[in-house]
Image: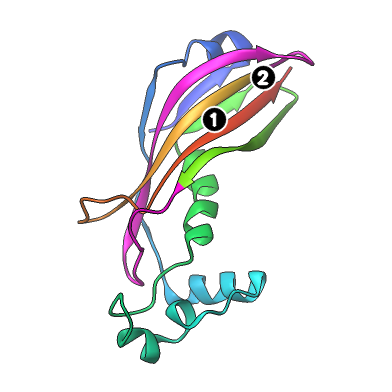
Amino acid sequence: MTTTVHGPGEIKALAGTDLGHSGWLEITQARIDAFADATGDRQWIHVDPVRAKEGPFGGPIAHGYLTLSLVIPLFTELLDVQGVKMSINYGLEKVRFPSPVKVGSKIRLAAVVVAVEDVAGDGVQMLLDFTVEIDGSAKPACVARTVYRHYM
């Protein structure tokens, strides 16, 4: 379920809020291949299913940065910020990839708003903890502390 907030007061009130989980998204070989083409990262563990089957993961896996990039569409399922002039992804404080995402796996995003503070330029900054979960796996695919800014 999407949480919708309007303006800085409601954004600030999110501090400490668990935003829940997105829906599940299946990771396909076609998505991995498209990411490899876009980034030039065509390592065999991602794009060669035959060779990858004999590799350390028993099949092709998604790039870590592909998994991280999917946080963006998954996060839009969790939070809708309205009443601002501009919202930006300001960066990342920490990112780890504890478990590989195999082709055919399903992932989803869990998000918690850690803190919200005022920033120069009539804005607020949100720190969020993101966990990309893999269906059926005890270990997450990705854990990240992200920074978003919203300007009024």
Question: What kind of residue is marked 1?
Answer: Asp
- Classify residue 52 as left or right of residue 41: left
Residue at x-position 30% and y-position 88%: 54
Question: Residue 134's image quarter?
Answer: bottom left
Is 71 magenta? The answer is no
Residue at x-position 37% and y-position 91%: 50
- Classify residue 141 as left or right of residue 47: left
The residue pinned by badge 2 equals 83
The magenta span reads: 96-124
User: Against 71, is 62 above or below?
Assistant: below
Residue 141, percent across and down? 36, 54
> What mark, if any, has residue 36 been given in the picture?
none
- Classify residue 118 as left or right of residue 135: right
Quadrant for the N terminus, please: top left
Quadrant for the C terminus, please: top right
Judge the density around disc 1: few (<14), some (14-19), many (≥20) Cα neighbours within 10 Å: few
> What mark, if any, has residue 80 been given in the picture?
1
User: Against 31, is 59 above or below?
Assistant: below
Disc 1 + disc 2, Cβ < 8 Å: no
Residue 67, percent across and down? 47, 57
Q: Residue furthest bottom?
A: 50
Judge the density around disc 2: few (<14), some (14-19), many (≥20) Cα neighbours within 10 Å: few
Residue 36, percent across and down? 58, 74
Whole-angstrom CA distance, mark 1 to mark 2, is 10 Å
User: Against 37, is 148 above or below?
Assistant: above
Nearer to us in this view, 94 or 13: 94
Residue at x-position 34% and y-position 69%: 102
Disc 1 secondary structure class: strand
Is 116 magenta? The answer is yes
Disc 2 secondary structure class: loop
